[in-house]
């Protein structure tokens, strides 16, 4: 599978082509077959499918379809209303609320998008960094749960000064996530156990472990409670709000931006990043050149787990501070995979993809509230984007674009 | 844990080449000894006094077996001794460079579980028939999913999307069975839904060379999103007409169903369970004994060689995963046409991943994968029974078991799990 991952990770731009070729002549062709354009078409196609789904399941559309022969206009109106209503609600929920009384309220959706984007970005980085070493980290859920439980425990257990407490909780999350992901890296390095299988299984082991801890009074469960839930976080461990209490946006977003910068530096500027990429492109060649492949696997999984741990901390210490629960990951662990794939495992790409999916999430909830369209449509659109994006030839076939020049 | 023989990586139906020395692994004796010591520790550290009762019959039985009551401490100690002897014998065999026979492992496992159960359920009654038939019920979707997984991976296509196929099958079965008021129609629809998911998997993984794990993971998300969306938007508001599927009734098989203990567990089941028996036999036979199966395995082990002798690699893979999808889809139907009244969002709850675990733990062999799925079904049902009796083992740890043993299996601690050589690698001609 590693060869396929490489193919996936290397957008087939043509770096090998001699630079003296007529650049401007091929520019148009490049754009039509380039990955940016493909990405745009993938999003377009996914949104199109989403629209069909919304229209087909809409009550008004279906009743209008019943007499489409008599009054076809009604059918098209209803279809248009359903789709237009859905996407304007999506926009109002994710970018700017045009119905708001003033600018402060109007811009709130944008801060919601940033809030939803933060955990997607850091966890996407976690998947992406592992990807660059040729490792497929599907264990986001388990890593977030363990990290969230660790952060939560620090968050409610200790009485510490504000900055110190928060820092300690964040470190606990990173350590928790790193250890959980590190198991997969260690087993891969020592026994060759496939990280896909190990991380999938660790998701469930982590889930039941946290579930167990949350149902034991002596461990994480809140005293005198029967619910599998911990005590709420102390104020000193909560990620502070960035723009005042009016907005939900918290420090997690800044942490995500810092993480992007760190991941960029790590992958593109550091010696370790060079080793990671070398192992990802060809482990055998890397080994032949003196790189300790097993060690790199362990290190990269530790880093990946720490990054995903930050996503767990983001949830427990920022978004839902009422206490640790078993569903703290809120699907982010799996979303992270789609974010990393859409971002092509590049830190800046992941930033963009995280913001896009954050917007879809924020807008999706608004769409559910105002248009009664289940938020699950976001999952559909998200996975379709990644599917279409993963197969550029499919996009080219569907849109009848020129094929790439044969090498 | 009955899969720890020395030549484990060789499919059981193929005889090893003459003259090839088989390497005897010491994992089996080590594992048996460790588990025996674990049981000894449990029984010694937390002694219990009292009796454990096993109810062997159900009231509807033709011939009533008596209930059996055993003194729990004495029984547990006897089991510890038996397990210890088995482990010792295994060590002796290893010293003589001989593999531990499978029957010894089976005897050991049954004894161990019996001893543990007797100890854990001290003072309570264990309805053995309920425990085992419940295990079978929980295992049915797992077995179908695992069979689909084995087929796909034997042809070289990793199928992470078993979860998606089960969920799609459950959804399609509920909806079509409700609309057409026929459980059989639901079964066919479930199978078709599984095929559809497999078709998408094939399109991306085989035709467009997209990484199979990526496609699988994304497909699971897609199916989850799609079925949840459709459930909230369409099924839930029209539950009476769209989500009230007729169910398959249990059909007791004459004679076989009257056998005490075995009858009520295996032969008073629904059509889907009987289909399961057929499917296991058919998949095993065709994979190892038919020309088709030989081709599938050739394509999964060495596609280039297969291509050279004229086997159409990608066509074979397509055909195999479509069949696998149909099988897995039937597993999904079991949820909505037998075990649960109606479809609900995320209702498979990770069963597809347990099925995947069974594929790996069963070393890509249909029989072993089936046994693994049954074991996992037993573990999760045992958890339910024990929590009713009030067991000292937290239920979460019982539920964790399949995943933990799978990690051990892939890490090579319990035998060696070796996938088909070309598993997961798209085939490009030329």
Image (cartoon, grey):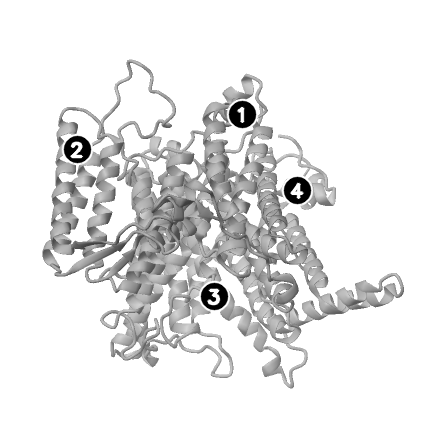
Q: Are marks 2 and 1 on the same chain?
A: yes
Task: Work out how far the residue at label 4 is from the one at label 2, CA to CA, in angstroms.
Answer: 56 Å
For residue A201, side relative to residue A358 (left or right): left
Quadrant (top left, top right, bottom left, bottom right) of the N terminus of chain B? top left
Task: Please name the residue that numbered disc 3 is placed on.
Answer: A118
Task: Please name the residue that numbered disc 1 is placed on.
Answer: B292
Marks 3 and 1: in contact by CB < 8 Å?
no
Q: Secondary structure at mark 4?
A: helix
Work out whether residue A120 or residue B208 is closer to the camera in this orientation and state it: B208
**Does B143 sit above or below residue B74?**
above
Q: Secondary structure at mark 2?
A: helix
Instruction: Using a 10 Å C-alpha cutoff, classify the residue at mark 4 as few (fewer than 14 neighbours), some (14 to 19) or many (20 or more).
Output: some
Task: Work out how far the residue at label 2 is from the one at label 3, CA to CA, in angstroms.
Answer: 55 Å
Marks 2 and 4: in contact by CB < 8 Å?
no
The residue marked by circle 3 belongs to what chain? Answer: A
Marks 3 and 2: in contact by CB < 8 Å?
no
Q: Secondary structure at mark 1?
A: helix
For residue B184, side relative to residue A142 (left or right): right
Residue A380 picture location, percent across and down: 60, 57
Quadrant (top left, top right, bottom left, bottom right) of the C terminus of chain B? top right
Work out whether residue A405 or residue B407 is closer to the camera in this orientation and state it: B407
Task: Please name the residue that numbered disc 4 is placed on.
Answer: A394
The residue marked by circle 1 belongs to what chain? Answer: B
**Does A49 sit above or below residue B143?**
below
Rendered image: mark on residue B90: 2
Task: Work out how far the residue at label 1 is from the one at label 4, CA to CA, in angstroms.
Answer: 30 Å
For residue B394, side relative to residue B44 (left or right): right
Residue B111 seen from this side: yes
Name the residue: 27% across, 63% down.
B389
Task: Work out how far the residue at label 3 is from the one at label 4, CA to CA, in angstroms.
Answer: 31 Å
């Amino acid at each position: 599978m590693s060869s396929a991952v490489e193919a996936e990770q290397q957008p087939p731009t043509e770096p090998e082509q001699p630079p003296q070729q007529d650049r401007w002549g091929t520019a148009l062709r490049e754009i039509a077959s380039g990955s940016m354009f493909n990405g745009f078409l993938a999003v377009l196609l996914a949104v199109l499918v989403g629209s069909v789904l919304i229209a087909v399941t809409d009550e008004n559309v279906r009743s209008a379809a019943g007499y489409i022969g008599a009054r076809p206009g009604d059918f098209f109106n209803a279809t248009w209303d359903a789709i237009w209503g859905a996407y304007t609600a999506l926009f109002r929920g994710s970018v700017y609320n045009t119905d708001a009384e003033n600018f402060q309220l109007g811009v709130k959706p944008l801060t919601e998008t940033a809030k939803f984007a933060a955990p997607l970005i850091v966890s996407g980085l976690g998947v992406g960094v592992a990807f660059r070493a040729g490792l497929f980290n599907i264990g986001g859920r388990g890593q977030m749960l363990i990290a969230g439980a660790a952060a939560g425990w620090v968050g409610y257990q200790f009485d510490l000064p504000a900055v110190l407490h928060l820092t300690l909780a964040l470190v606990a999350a990173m350590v928790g996530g790193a250890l959980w992901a590190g198991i997969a890296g260690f087993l891969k390095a020592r026994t060759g156990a496939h990280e896909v299988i190990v991380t999938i299984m660790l998701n469930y082991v982590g889930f039941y472990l946290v579930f167990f801890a949350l149902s034991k009074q002596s461990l994480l469960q809140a005293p005198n409670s029967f619910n599998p839930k911990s005590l709420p976080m102390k104020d000193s461990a909560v990620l502070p709000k960035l723009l005042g209490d009016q907005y939900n946006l918290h420090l997690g977003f800044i942490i995500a931006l810092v993480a992007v910068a760190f991941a960029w530096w790590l992958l593109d500027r550091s010696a370790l990043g060079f080793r990671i990429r070398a192992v990802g492109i060809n482990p055998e060649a890397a080994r032949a050149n003196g790189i300790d492949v097993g060690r790199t696997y362990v290190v990269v999984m530790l880093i990946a787990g720490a990054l995903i741990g930050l996503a767990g901390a983001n949830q427990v210490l920022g978004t839902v501070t009422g206490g640790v629960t078993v569903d703290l990951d809120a699907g982010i662990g799996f979303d992270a995979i789609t974010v990393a794939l859409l971002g092509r495992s590049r830190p800046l790409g992941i930033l963009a993809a995280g913001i896009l999916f954050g917007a879809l999430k924020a807008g999706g909830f608004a769409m559910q509230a105002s248009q009664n369209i289940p938020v699950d449509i976001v999952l559909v659109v998200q996975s379709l984007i990644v599917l279409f994006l993963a197969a550029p030839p499919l996009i080219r076939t569907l849109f009848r674009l020129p094929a790439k020049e044969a090498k | 844990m009955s899969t720890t023989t020395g030549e484990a990586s060789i499919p059981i139906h193929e005889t090893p080449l003459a003259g090839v020395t088989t390497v005897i692994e010491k994992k089996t004796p080590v594992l048996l000894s460790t588990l025996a010591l674990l049981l000894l520790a449990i029984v010694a550290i937390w002694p219990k006094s009292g009796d454990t009762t096993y109810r062997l019959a159900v009231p509807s039985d033709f011939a009533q077996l008596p209930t059996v009551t055993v003194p729990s401490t004495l029984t547990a100690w006897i089991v510890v001794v038996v397990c210890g002897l088995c482990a010792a014998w295994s060590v002796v065999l290893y010293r003589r460079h001989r593999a531990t026979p499978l029957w010894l492992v089976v005897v050991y496992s049954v004894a161990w579980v019996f001893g543990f159960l007797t100890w854990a359920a001290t003072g309570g009654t264990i309805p053995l028939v309920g425990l085992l038939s419940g295990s079978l019920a929980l295992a049915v979707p797992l077995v179908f999913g695992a069979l689909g997984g084995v087929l796909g991976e034997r042809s070289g296509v990793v199928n992470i999307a078993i979860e998606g196929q089960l969920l799609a099958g459950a959804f399609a079965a509920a909806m079509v069975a409700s609309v057409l008021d026929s459980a059989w129609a639901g079964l066919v629809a479930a199978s078709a839904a599984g095929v559809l998911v497999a078709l998408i998997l094939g399109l991306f993984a085989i035709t467009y060379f997209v990484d199979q794990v990526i496609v699988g993971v994304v497909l699971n998300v897609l199916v989850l999103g799609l079925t949840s969306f459709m459930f909230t938007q369409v099924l839930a508001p029209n539950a009476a007409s769209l989500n009230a599927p007729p169910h398959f009734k249990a059909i007791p098989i004459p004679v076989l169903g009257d056998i005490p203990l075995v009858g009520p567990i295996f032969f008073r089941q629904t059509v889907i369970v009987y289909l399961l028996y057929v499917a296991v036999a058919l998949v095993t036979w065709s994979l190892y004994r038919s020309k088709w199966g030989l081709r599938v395995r050739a394509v999964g082990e060495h596609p280039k060689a297969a291509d050279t002798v004229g086997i159409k690699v990608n066509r074979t893979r397509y055909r195999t995963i479509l069949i696998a999808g149909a099988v897995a889809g039937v597993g999904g139907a079991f949820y909505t046409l037998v075990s649960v009244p109606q479809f609900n969002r995320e209702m498979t709850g990770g069963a597809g991943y347990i099925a995947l675990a069974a594929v790996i733990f069963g070393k890509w062999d249909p029989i072993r994968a089936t046994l693994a799925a049954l074991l996992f079904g037993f573990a999760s049902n045992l958890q339910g029974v024990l929590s009713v009796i009030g067991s000292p083992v937290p239920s979460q740890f019982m539920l964790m078991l399949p995943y933990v043993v799978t990690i051990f299996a892939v890490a090579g601690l319990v035998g060696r799990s070796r996938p088909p050589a070309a598993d997961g690698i798209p085939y490009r001609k030329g």
